Amino acid sequence: MSTQRLIEDSVKHIQDVYTYDVNISKIAVKNIEDLFETVVKINKQYSLSTVSEANKANMEEKRLQELKKSSKISSLSDENYTALLSLDEKQLDELKTFLISTTNKISDEVTIRENRPEDIVLAQGVITTKFTNSRFPKNVKELGMAIEYSQVKPNFFIDYSKTEELKEEAKKAVKPVIIKKDQIIA
């Protein structure tokens, strides 16, 4: 076996080094808080209780468009936005609290590495379990899962310099193969 092959084998066994980014969960929590603040603001600004039946549909469309325009969470469907706008303040507060708690739980307990879709699937499974076991009505569970899924992002990123450093150390640690004169190589 040549020295080069030993070096290649030792480098091949070095796994990527990951670094945790604490800001990912903070950004997700901020996005959720901002979304709910926007919903409360729009519900107050475009109150349906003061609108006649004839203008209700028009007002609901205005509210929907305003929320879509203002929201940092853009991956939700129109149905999700409409469902969010239909919740009262108590329901909004309960859902927001539950979402933030779930976001923090995932951040603390689930490793979501970049370029690893199976990690995202695992986190989504945790979300589904949390909402399935919750006491929210079915439509609120689906809404909550859609919001939470949209905030699942990798929180561990490959540290290329540390990984490369380990590979270099592994290369240096390989002892060269020395072939002596008249040695028979099998």
Image (spheres, rainbow, N blue to C red):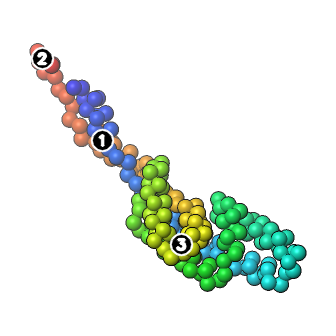
* x 57%, y 76%: residue: 96
C-alpha gap between disc 1 and disc 2: 29 Å
Residue 57, disc: none
Q: Amino acid at mark 1?
A: His
Q: Secondary structure at mark 1?
A: loop
Question: Could you tell me which quadrant the C terminus lies in?
Answer: top left
Q: Position of residue 76 (x, y in %)?
A: 65, 61
Is 98 left or right of 184, judged from the image as shown? right
Horizontal and vertical percent for residue 11? 32, 39
Does label 1 or label 2 sit earlier along the sequence?
Answer: 1
> In whole angstroms, how far apart are the C-alphas of marks 1 and 3?
39 Å
User: Which residue is rendered at x = 52% and y = 60% of the image?
Assistant: 152
Residue beneath label 3, please? 99
Residue receiving disc 2:
184
**Splitting the image into 4 quarters, where does residue 105 fall?**
bottom left
Lower position in the chain sequence, tag 3 or tag 2: 3
Amino acid type of the residue tagged 3 in the rendering? Leu
Q: How far apart are the alpha carbons under marks 3 and 2?
A: 68 Å
